[in-house]
Structure formats: structure tokens, C-alpha cells
């Protein structure tokens, strides 16, 4: 199975709003997903410019291309587990 | 800080971003929209209704503009008016932490409670072990008589079903010095004489009821509406607090209006030299121990709450002092803004005429967000003065003691220990060290667990920041070779 790509937006807005807290995935990932993810810290993905309510929907994270708004550690891990469970079956 | 990002502290960042945004747009003419924009109609709310959410947001905005919620004289004063008052103000707000009374949930007094998990067992260890006979069996289940309970926790320890829980008051629990307590209505208040500005209550309150007075408007005004040269002094804990590199951050800060950026780690090198010299001298003159002095929350705690230890606190000045001194020598007319992880630095700045304002990383982050500056895309620039490994390691627990050790080497017996986080228990430990003596002669004290990288004004995850600080240390010259 290909690794799940986790792209964390590290534009200034996402970083300040909490993307930095999601980076824990890099060095302390939960055991069950540890070997199944590939993490990329990205430049601003520009999502913050496209929302009507500016800054209110970050931090943004893409998991295998799927966008998570107002992302936090839990949300991202849950999405990863969903994908793992869906593909293994 | 060690608390993960949650709704309460994420909202604080958003409020700061909004304040900067409204300043930049039209100098607060539309500041009254902030609560509406943060809690728009039709979207979920967290308190009893959207209107209470907005009312509390208004108080939190007031604090962001530097006005204490309890100083409100007329409830109809608008945020636009507060914004204008903040713009006209000559000095910054009085430094203090406050509780927004209407946001404080007046948590019930800390107590033990028996939950549904109680099976009403035959052994009844809770009842047998209770020293005050406070537990009786009512309806087949244990029940604690609150009038008798002394909150010792024995029942919780012995229950085989983990049926007994302890309900704490988060802010009182977090405060290491007992500075926050309830009034007759159960609402919390902070005693400014006891408060050491550690910020632990601010981060622990699940209702976001604790606020501190920001100086962000004072600095914004200087950056945008004056010709003054405003210089940012970046605390050593800055490494890893923003995206991109530290060198990119220099030009990012210039984009939001700072004329120059210097590293406080340079001052930390001087602190290291002076503190090492002081230590060697003190040991030679037969003193039994010395503690560090660069953590301003500990410094005040020693003064107010641990008088026993006061005589042992180092007289060496903290890194901010030397950095500001160097800066003002070179540019006497500049405005010196300390940028760091720390709220207590604001009280340290009060006794230092060379430091004009103190901002947190979070506040600078808000300025960068509202200013639309992408740090990762900025051109890297160099600092004029390069800091050494010793000064760069100050923001992690053990860093200060380690830096001093490298210069003491061989010149005195050095037995260091680090108080990593000023908790109630560690305050007792320090009292013991002072009165009964200990096996150490150098005691480093950091109020935040993990060091300054875990300070209340931090943005990044403390663990990751600590790793990045260590990497930054690796690339630095050694102070021993420089001296």
C-alpha cells in the first residue's frame, strides 16, 4: 500500500493558527499509523485566500489530496485511520 | 505551552489577528465588527448563546487593546472607542492578568465525587479508609458527605473500579502561588501582588476567562504612524516559533515595519559570562549555592513567595537587559521591543528603562498573519551580531545551567540541578533547598515546564521547538573560544 500523503500547510496563517501543533505527527506519530504516512510541510496552499471568512477556517491540511479545514491533530489522525481502514478491509 | 491548541486559545490568536486587521484597515473604525465576524450568525456557538459569546469576545478584544475588563466604566463604550483610546495612550497598559467575570464559569470548589461506575461493593474500601467517616452507602452506592470530606483522596486511591473522581478548578490548580481565588459568588479573581505572571491560569481556563493586557496597539502605532526606529529583540526561544528560518524571519519582521532585528541570545552570552564569574566568586567566598535569575516569573516568586531562597538568587542581569543595553548604546533614540514567549517579561521590562515594549510570539504572529507576510517566502538576512551556543541554549530546561557550566569548568566545584517548571511542589522543594541545604550548588529555575520554548506566548509545539533550538545550537560558535 502506498504511503498516505499528509500535507501540512505551513503558510504563516496556518502555522500561527495551530499547524505547528499538528507537526507532532512528524516525530511522535501514533503507533498504528507511524509507518503508513509521509509528511510534507508545505508553503502556503492559498486556501486562506479563498474563504469568505478569512483566517477562520485554518489550519489547512491535505490528506491524500482531501482537504481538512480547521485541522487539528485528532482530525488529521482520524482521517488517516479512515483511509487505512478503508483500503485494508 | 504544554496545553494543546484548543478553542479557547485558538480564539485568542484569532482575536489578535482581527485587532491588527482592524487597525490596518482604518484604525479601528470598524472594530465593533470583530465579535460579529468571529461569531457570525447561523454558525455554532460555545457558551449559552451567540450573544454571550459575542459579549465575552468584546471583553477579550478590550484586553487585546490593553484595557482590563474590570476597568470598564460604561458597558456601552464601543470597541471602536477603546481602539481610539488605545491609539491616544502614551504608555502601555498596566501589566496584569485579569478574569472576565462574566466568562468565568465559577467552577465548583475542588472536590471528590462518586460516579456511576460505583458497584456498591461488599469490601467498601472507600468507606473503610476514609479518615473522616464521610462516606456512607445510599441507595446501594457510595456517597461522599461534602461537609465532612477533607479532600484527601484516599477513597479515589482505593476504589477498585476507579469510580471516584476528583473535579479540580483548573486555574487554581495551575497557579503555583495561590494568586487566583474565588469571591463570595464563586468567581475567580487574581491578586496582582501575589501573581508572578507565569500565565498558567490563562492557558488552563477552559472558558477562556483569563486575559492579559496586550501592548500590541502601542507597537502597531509606532510601526505604522511614526518615524521612530523600532527594533525587535528576539528572545532565544524564537527558533521554531515561525515557519521558515530565523534568517527569513528577520526580513519578514522588516516587512511589518520593524527597522532592525537583533537576537537576545547575544545578551544571553553576556549573562552566561557574568553569571559564571559571579558563581566562581560566590563559591570562593564560601556561599553554599546560587540560583539563576533570568526567569522573571521565578524572580518575582522568589521575592514574594520564597523569601528563604531570595539571598541565593544571582545578581546577574537577564539576557534582555544586556541586549537592550547594547541596543540603546548604539541607537539611543530607538524603540526597543522585546519579542518572546513570556508574559512575565512585561514585569521585568517595568524595571528596565531600556526596554520599551514586550510582545509575545503569538502577537507577532498575528501581525504577520494580518499583514499577509509569508515568512517562508521571505529573503533570508543575517544578524549583525552572531550569538554563541551558550546563549542559544537558554530557552530549554538545563540550558542556562549548562551554559554557565561551560565557563565555570575547573574554576569551582559545580553541582547543578534544574527546576523544570515552577509547580507548588517545586516551590516547596526550593524552600527546602534554602533552609535545609541540598546536594547542589547551582540551581537553574524555569517557571515553564520544558523551559521558555514552552512559554505561554509560544506558537509552536514545545517539543519540536526544543529540537530546533538544539539544531541551532549545533551551528553556533563556542563562547569559550570567543572570549
Image: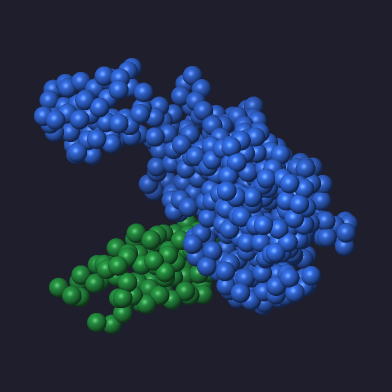
Chain colours: A green, B blue
Q: Position of residue B283 (x, y in %)?
A: 73, 51
Q: Is residue B449 above or below residue B249?
A: above
Q: Quadrant of the C terminus of chain B?
A: bottom right
Q: Is residue B68 above or below residue B318?
A: above
Q: Is residue B172 above or below residue A12?
A: above
Q: Is residue B38 visible?
A: no
Identify the residue at horizontal 24%, vertical 35% (top origin).
B158
Q: Residue furthest bottom?
A: A2
Q: Is residue B182 visible?
A: yes
Q: Give the total number of marks visible in the rendering.
A: 0
Q: Residue furthest top?
A: B147
Q: Position of residue B307 (x, y in %)?
A: 66, 33
Viewer-side residue, B380 vs B303 = B303
Identify the residue at horizontal 39%, vertical 29% (top origin).
B110
Q: Position of residue B21 (x, y in %)?
A: 61, 55
Identify the residue at horizontal 23%, vertical 29% (top origin).
B126
Q: Is residue B76 left or right of residue B253?
A: left
Viewer-side residue, B322 vs B50 = B322
Q: Position of residue A4 (x, y in %)?
A: 32, 76
Q: Is residue B314 left or right of residue B14?
A: right
- The answer to which image quadrant residue B275 occupies is bottom right
Identify the residue at horizontal 51%, vertical 38% (top origin).
B424
Amino acid at each position: 500500500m502506498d504511503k498516505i500523503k499528509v500535507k501540512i500547510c505551513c503558510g504563516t496563517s496556518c502555522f500561527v493558527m495551530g499547524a505547528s501543533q499538528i507537526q507532532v505527527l512528524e516525530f511522535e506519530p501514533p503507533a498504528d499509523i507511524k509507518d503508513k504516512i509521509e509528511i510534507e510541510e508545505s508553503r502556503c496552499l492559498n486556501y486562506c485566500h479563498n474563504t469568505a471568512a478569512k483566517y477562520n477556517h485554518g489550519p489547512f491540511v491535505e490528506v491524500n489530496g482531501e482537504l481538512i479545514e480547521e485541522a487539528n491533530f485528532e482530525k488529521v489522525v482520524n482521517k488517516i485511520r479512515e483511509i487505512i481502514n478503508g483500503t485494508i478491509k | 505551552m504544554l496545553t494543546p491548541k484548543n478553542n479557547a486559545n485558538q480564539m485568542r490568536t484569532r482575536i489578535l489577528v482581527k485587532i491588527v486587521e482592524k487597525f490596518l484597515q482604518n484604525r479601528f473604525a470598524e472594530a465593533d465588527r470583530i465579535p460579529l465576524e468571529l461569531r457570525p450568525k447561523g454558525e455554532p456557538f460555545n457558551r449559552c448563546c451567540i450573544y454571550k459569546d459575542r459579549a465575552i469576545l468584546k471583553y477579550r478584544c478590550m484586553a487585546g487593546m490593553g484595557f482590563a475588563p474590570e476597568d470598564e466604566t460604561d458597558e456601552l463604550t464601543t470597541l471602536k472607542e477603546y481602539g481610539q483610546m488605545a491609539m491616544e495612550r502614551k504608555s502601555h497598559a498596566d501589566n496584569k492578568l485579569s478574569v472576565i467575570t462574566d466568562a468565568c464559569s465559577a467552577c465548583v470548589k475542588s472536590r471528590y465525587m462518586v460516579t456511576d461506575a460505583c458497584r456498591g461493593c461488599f469490601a467498601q474500601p472507600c468507606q473503610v479508609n476514609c479518615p473522616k467517616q464521610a462516606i456512607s452507602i445510599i441507595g446501594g452506592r457510595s456517597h461522599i458527605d461534602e461537609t465532612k470530606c477533607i479532600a484527601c483522596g484516599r477513597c479515589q486511591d482505593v476504589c477498585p473500579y476507579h469510580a471516584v473522581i476528583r473535579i479540580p478548578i483548573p486555574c487554581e490548580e495551575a497557579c503555583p502561588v495561590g494568586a487566583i481565588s474565588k469571591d463570595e459568588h464563586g468567581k475567580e479573581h487574581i491578586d496582582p501582588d501575589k501573581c508572578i505572571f507565569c500565565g498558567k491560569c490563562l492557558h488552563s481556563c477552559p472558558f477562556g476567562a483569563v486575559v492579559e493586557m496586550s501592548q500590541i496597539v502601542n507597537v502597531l502605532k509606532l510601526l505604522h504612524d511614526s518615524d521612530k526606529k523600532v527594533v525587535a529583540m528576539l528572545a532565544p526561544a524564537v527558533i521554531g516559533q515561525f515557519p521558515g528560518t530565523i534568517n527569513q524571519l528577520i526580513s519578514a519582521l522588516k516587512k511589518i515595519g520593524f527597522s532592525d532585528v537583533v537576537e537576545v541570545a547575544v545578551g544571553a552570552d553576556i549573562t552566561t559570562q557574568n553569571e559564571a564569574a559571579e558563581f566562581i566568586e560566590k563559591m570562593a567566598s564560601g556561599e553554599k549555592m546560587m540560583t539563576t535569575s533570568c526567569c522573571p516569573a521565578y524572580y518575582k516568586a522568589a521575592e514574594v513567595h520564597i523569601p528563604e531562597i531570595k539571598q541565593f538568587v544571582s545578581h546577574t542581569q537577564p539576557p534582555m537587559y544586556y541586549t537592550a543595553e547594547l541596543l540603546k548604546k548604539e541607537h539611543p533614540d530607538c524603540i526597543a521591543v522585546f519579542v518572546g514567549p513570556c508574559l512575565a517579561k512585561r514585569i521585568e521590562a517595568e524595571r528596565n528603562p531600556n526596554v520599551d515594549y514586550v510582545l509575545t510570539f503569538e502577537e507577532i504572529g498575528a501581525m504577520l498573519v494580518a499583514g499577509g507576510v509569508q515568512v517562508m517566502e521571505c529573503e533570508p538576512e543575517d544578524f549583525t551580531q552572531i550569538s554563541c551556543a551558550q546563549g542559544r541554549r537558554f530557552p530549554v530546561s538545563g540550558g542556562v545551567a549548562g551554559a554557565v557550566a561551560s565557563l565555570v569548568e575547573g574554576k569551582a566545584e559545580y553541582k547543578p540541578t534544574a527546576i523544570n517548571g515552577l509547580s507548588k511542589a517545586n516551590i516547596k522543594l526550593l524552600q527546602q533547598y534554602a533552609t535545609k541545604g541540598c546536594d547542589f550548588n547551582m540551581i537553574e529555575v524555569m517557571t515553564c515546564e520544558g523551559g521558555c520554548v514552552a512559554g505561554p506566548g509560544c506558537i509552536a509545539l514545545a517539543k519540536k521547538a526544543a529540537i530546533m533550538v538544539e539544531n541551532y545550537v549545533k551551528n553556533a560558535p563556542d563562547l569559550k573560544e570567543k572570549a
